[in-house]
Structures are given as structure tokens and as C-alpha cells.
């Protein structure tokens, strides 16, 4: 395998692909190992994920399933979700090592802050979705149906898909400041560029918020406002970490005549 510390300009396109293949294979192995390790605790993780939904159900109503294999597939999905979360730091490190040869030496030292920051922002986004968005939306929709006199029959497949969609999507969008940090360091964006296109970004943020949340205004606002704040935080991050040219040395004074 080509050295990851080598000059990327001296590597052919096929060598880049080979290195990418090796790193993706390593991530797949880590993901598989984490999946097997997560299987014994998948029941506990499932109970944690769906706790807000169970609290919103009317008394005496339990979650149901309609397919014989639904419980098995449920624990498979929960184990995969757990493996993704646990293996995220390793996957981020492999990504950084893949792009590191194209960075300056001082930028390569930012690997640990990058991995730690990206993992932290993902976990904050996942916590925000699970602790704020999921409880509100479940309570709102279930109460709406109960007040109309409907009997809720909610399946475990529907609940898990709903929770995982919100948790993973919100965790991903909370990576925005980290993405802006990376794009700034490689010279793709600048604070001025981000501020100039704030209007377009504002529209895209709220469109994304509408797509990843249930179809009610308050849920969209609970995602849209934090995302807008994260974009503004990203502008500040870009300004802090923007590479600045070193000042030219002052000319030495000429000797007296």
C-alpha cells in the first residue's frame, strides 16, 4: 500500500483508489466487529431509543409487530446503529489519514481535534434529536390521534425507523461546523464566502430541516434554528482557522555610506 505520508502528487489515480479501498476495508472490519459486540446489548439500546415513544403512548397501549421476523430485524438494525456510533471515531481517523498527505505538516497535527470535534458534534446532535425532537413529535402526533378517538396500533418497525432517521440525520447535520473547519483548512471556503452566501444557505438549511423532520412546523423549527446557529458558528470557526499568509520579513537596513 502506498505510504500515507508520501507526496500525493507522486501517487497515480489507481494508487489513490487502492489506498481508499484499504481504508474502507478497515472501516468495514471495525464496523463488523462493533456489530457483533453490540448484539448482546441491542435490547438495552432498543429500550433506550424507544423510551420517549413508550412514554407518549396512552396507558395500556404497547408497541406491536406484524411480521414474524420483525423482532429479529429490529435487533439487527439496532446493532448496526450502535456499531456506526461506536465506529465513527475510527472512520473519521481513517478519513483524515487518507486526506492528510495533501495537507501541510501543521494541519496534519489537527487529526485528534478533528476526530474529537466531529464525534462530539454528532453525539450532541443525536442527543438533541432523541431528547427534544422525538419526545415532542411523538407526543404531538399520538395525542392528536387519541383526541380524535383513534386507537393507536404502532409497530416496532415504524417506531425504530422514525427514531433512527431523526437521530442519524440530526447528528449528521450537527457536523456542519466541523465540515466548514475542514473546508477552510484546505482552502475551499472562507468566512467572506460563507457570509456572502448566507441567504442561499439559510434556504437550504430550512429545506433540509423540513425534509428530515415530521410534517409539522414546530419540529422543523427545532431543527432549523439550531442548524442556522451552527452555520453562523461555522463562519466563526472559519475565521479562526483561516490560513493566513505569513508577513514578509522587513528589509534589513542598509549600511551607512
Image (cartoon, rainbow, N blue to C red):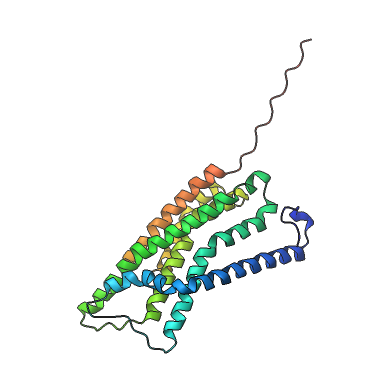
Q: Is 38 placed left or right of 140 in the picture?
A: right
> Among all residues in the image, which is located at the extreme front?
40
Q: Is 131 placed left or right of 85 in the picture?
A: left
Q: Nearer the viewer, residue 175 or 95?
A: 95
Residue occupying the point 54% across, 64% down? 87
Can you say which quadrant of the picture contains the C terminus? top right
Q: Position of residue 230 (x, y in %)?
A: 44, 53
Q: Is residue 163 visible?
A: no
Q: Position of residue 75 (x, y in %)?
A: 45, 78
Quarter of the rendering containing residue 55: bottom left
Residue occupying the point 42% across, 55% down? 228
Can you say which quadrant of the picture contains the N terminus? bottom right
Residue occupying the point 76% across, 52% down? 7
Q: Nearer the viewer, residue 209 or 170?
A: 170
Q: Is residue 165 visible?
A: yes
Residue 89, placed above or below residue 254 = below
Amino acid at each position: 500500500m502506498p505510504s500515507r505520508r508520501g507526496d500525493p502528487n507522486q501517487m497515480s489515480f489507481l494508487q489513490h483508489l487502492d489506498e481508499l479501498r484499504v481504508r474502507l476495508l478497515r472501516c468495514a472490519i471495525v464496523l463488523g466487529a462493533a456489530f457483533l459486540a453490540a448484539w448482546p446489548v441491542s435490547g438495552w439500546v432498543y429500550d433506550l431509543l424507544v423510551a420517549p415513544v413508550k412514554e407518549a403512548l396512552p396507558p395500556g397501549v404497547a408497541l406491536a409487530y406484524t411480521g414474524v421476523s420483525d423482532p429479529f430485524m429490529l435487533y439487527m438494525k439496532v446493532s448496526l446503529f450502535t456499531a456506526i456510533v461506536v465506529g465513527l471515531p475510527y472512520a473519521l481517523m481513517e478519513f483524515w489519514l487518507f486526506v492528510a498527505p495533501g495537507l501541510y505538516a501543521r494541519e496534519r497535527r489537527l487529526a485528534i481535534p478533528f476526530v474529537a470535534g466531529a464525534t462530539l458534534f454528532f453525539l450532541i446532535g443525536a442527543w438533541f434529536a432523541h431528547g427534544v425532537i422525538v419526545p415532542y413529535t411523538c407526543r404531538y402526533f399520538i395525542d392528536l390521534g387519541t383526541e380524535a378517538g383513534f386507537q393507536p396500533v404502532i409497530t416496532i418497525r415504524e417506531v425504530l425507523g422514525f427514531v433512527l432517521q431523526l437521530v442519524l440525520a440530526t447528528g449528521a447535520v450537527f457536523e456542519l461546523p466541523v465540515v466548514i473547519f475542514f473546508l477552510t483548512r484546505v482552502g475551499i471556503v472562507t468566512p467572506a464566502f460563507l457570509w456572502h452566501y448566507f441567504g442561499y444557505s439559510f434556504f437550504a438549511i430550512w429545506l433540509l430541516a423540513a425534509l428530515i423532520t415530521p410534517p409539522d412546523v414546530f419540529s422543523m423549527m427545532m431543527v432549523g434554528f439550531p442548524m442556522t446557529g451552527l452555520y453562523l458558528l461555522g463562519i466563526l470557526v472559519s475565521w479562526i482557522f483561516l490560513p493566513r499568509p505569513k508577513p514578509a520579513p522587513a528589509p534589513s537596513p542598509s549600511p551607512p555610506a
